[in-house]
Amino acid sequence: MTVRLDFVDAGEAVDLTAFLARLVHYDKAAAVRLQAAGDTLAVFGRPPSFEVLAVRTARLAKPYEYGLDTSLDVTVSAGEFLEAVAEAGEAEETAGTAVVPEAVTGPPWAGVLPPRAGWRQVHGLPSAGEVRELVRDAVAEFRGRVEELAPERRVRAELDLVGREIWSREIPGTQLPVRAAHAAHALGFLRGDALDLLSAGPWLRLRTPFGSIALRRTGVGALTVTPT
């Protein structure tokens, strides 16, 4: 039986398309985990090299329903889902409706997701403008340090060392690594002035109106696992 998602309007599909396109840009073989319950769809992805989880939600026109099931939890190809959602945003006669692709074997990260509840506000995060400036400065530093390397040293291992040193730095006043803000910027989340930091057990979450970036801190409590 075909499984469909009915978005509240085509605009939701368009916004989700932009997020999926960025994920696929970084990884052509990317997978996403979809969780729908009630009138909300959550899409989880993991852009390579950032070592974080990206979360984008979309509003559904009606509570999810598939036969006797009232919730959806499936991992699919990001590219195939991108095509389905893009069509939902473009076709007038079916605007807002996307067909869910067949399930795929999920990567390891898809089995360990941030908790759904229990998030608490973390104070000390700089303003959105300051975070964007911090990311710009980090990108400029990375490029400058790479340019300073002798040509024979511009190999992947050397670039990874430079990147790891820069992106693992913590944003002042927080325990959030700069790579989380960099991922938010790369995925189009770091826009506007609304930005906050949340925590739940070992998880940190950088939240914006356009999406969230989540990651687990090492050595903090026990793993929080969302059942697959």
Image: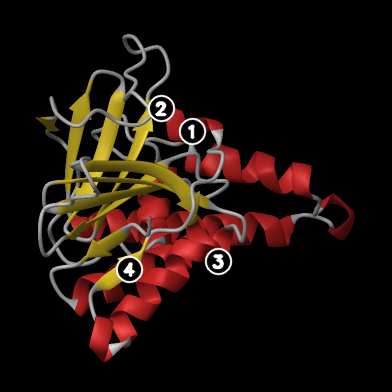
The amino acid type found where label 3 is placed reads His
Q: Residue at x 11, y 53 (%)?
A: 63
Location of mark 1 (residue): 109
Q: CA distance from mark 2 to mark 3?
A: 23 Å
Q: Quadrant of residue 124?
A: top left
Q: Looking at the image, is mark 2 or mark 3 earlier in the sequence?
A: 3
Callout 2 environment at 10 Å: few (<14), some (14 to 19), or many (20+)? few
Q: Is residue 173 left or right of residue 52?
A: left
Looking at the rendered structure, which numbered label has been put on residue 112?
2
| Mark in the foreground, 2 or 3 | 2
Q: Residue at x 37, y 59 (%)?
A: 2
The answer to whether the residues at label 4 and label 3 have Cβ atoms under 8 Å apart is no
Callout 4 environment at 10 Å: few (<14), some (14 to 19), or many (20+)? many
Q: Position of residue 94 (x, y in %)?
A: 26, 81
Residue sitting nearer the eye, 217 or 138:
217
Residue sitting nearer the eye, 183 or 86:
86
Q: CA distance from mark 3 to mark 1?
A: 19 Å
**Could you tell me which secondary element the residue under label 3 belongs to?**
helix
The amino acid type found where label 4 is placed reads Ala
User: In this rendering, does residue 178 appear at all?
Assistant: no
| Mark in the foreground, 2 or 4 | 4
Looking at the rendered structure, which numbered label has been put on residue 25?
3
Q: CA distance from mark 2 to mark 1?
A: 5 Å
